[in-house]
Amino acid sequence: MDTVLVEGFGAEYQDLFEEQIAKPFTEATGIQVKYSAGGSGAEQYAAIRAANGDPGFDLAVMTSLELYQGRRDEMLTPVTPQQVPNMARLPQKLLNNTYGVGAIQDIQQVVLMYNRTAFPQPPTSWGVQWDPEYRSGALIFNPANILGVYALLNAAELDGGGIDDIDPGFARTAELAKYALATPTRSAEAVPFMAKETATAFPYLDGRAAIYSKTNNYDFTVPREGTYASLGSLGIPVGAAHKDSAYKLIDYWLSEEVQQRWALAYNVGPAITGLQFSPDFAAKHITTPEALEEIKIADAATVVKNRTEWSQQWAEAVR
């Protein structure tokens, strides 16, 4: 039996992948899927690079930032509509962020998670995290997690900065760090604070936010300043032993039926357009061409170039 080895995220993601993707894919194709839970997208790519493109798996679940790095470092295999016909379904804005070496399978957006008791009405600005009434319950994510990068950008933009002038973001981070509840690296580290209801407002990705809004006293919103997209991506290492099977799995994931199923299961936006969702779901996630057009996508070259330095500056700001 043909096999494809997938390295991806753990926890809920692994459970959903095995149920919604792996099992039905094997039933449809006869190709066996073996899944290994790794760390963040950055950690997945670090394993590929450390192994000079032959990390022992065939397909990595990452973000578009790692696709950019893989193209730059020549560590990822080309992925085009010739090998993956359903790539033709991706809107141009998403295709522009695959760099010819991967596919985007879902769209998350950075949202503001908030405690319903502290906020009977949804907060309307990212700036609420600095409000004296709420800052003691803030969570400041490390830029090792992509949430930390987008939080810095949002903070910088509050004071006229942005990706090319991020110093205002560090100034705000240093101020908030005097009062914040914690400085997590992994998304799961926020969960205990939600269970205890000590967190007030903090950035999160809408997939996990939707899960925990159903089990905790929290909800999420997109503030008036707008937000950034995190693009779930799939890349094939250049040394992968089962490239044909990996191409088939990507193509399967981008099919209309599977895109709809995955979006609803993981609480994310689909990578293809033209699918129908309930008004409640569409209000919380990126599901339409209009919503995709509106959301910001950070320039990968700038983020990748500066991320290590930003992490060092962040560490100085929060110490």
Image (cartoon, helix red, strand yellow):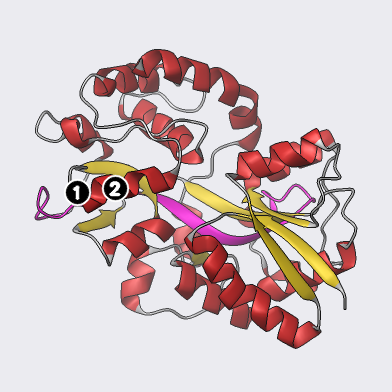
Read off the magenta span: 95-121
Instruction: Say which residue appears at 23% left-offset and 43% top-offset.
Output: 201
Q: Is residue 129 left or right of residue 147?
A: left
User: For the residue carrying disc 2, how many other residues have a C-alpha within 10 Å: few (<14), some (14-19), or many (20+)?
Assistant: few
Q: Is residue 184 left or right of residue 238?
A: left
Q: Secondary structure at mark 2?
A: helix
Q: Is residue 34 above or below residue 208?
A: below
| Quadrant in the picture for residue 129 | top left
Instruction: Say which residue appears at 23% left-offset and 53% top-offset.
Output: 195
User: For the residue carrying disc 1, how many other residues have a C-alpha within 10 Å: few (<14), some (14-19), or many (20+)?
Assistant: few
Give percent across and percent down for residue 110: 41, 48
Please state which amino acid type lies under the numbered disc 1. Answer: Lys
Q: Is residue 10 above or below residue 65?
A: below
The residue wearing badge 2 is 192
Q: Is residue 253 above or below residue 62?
A: below
| Quadrant in the picture for residue 207 | bottom left
Give percent across and percent down for residue 42: 63, 39
Give percent across and percent down for residue 247: 82, 66
Q: Secondary structure at mark 1?
A: loop
Mark 1 and mark 2 in contact? Answer it, CB < 8 Å: yes
Please state which amino acid type lies under the numbered disc 2. Answer: Pro
Disc 1/disc 2 C-alpha distance (Å): 6 Å
Q: Is residue 295 left or right of residue 192?
A: right
Give percent across and percent down for residue 279: 33, 76
The residue wearing badge 1 is 196
Any magenta on residue 70?
no
Foreground of the two, 94 or 310: 310
Any magenta on residue 103?
yes
* Residue 227 appearing in the image: no
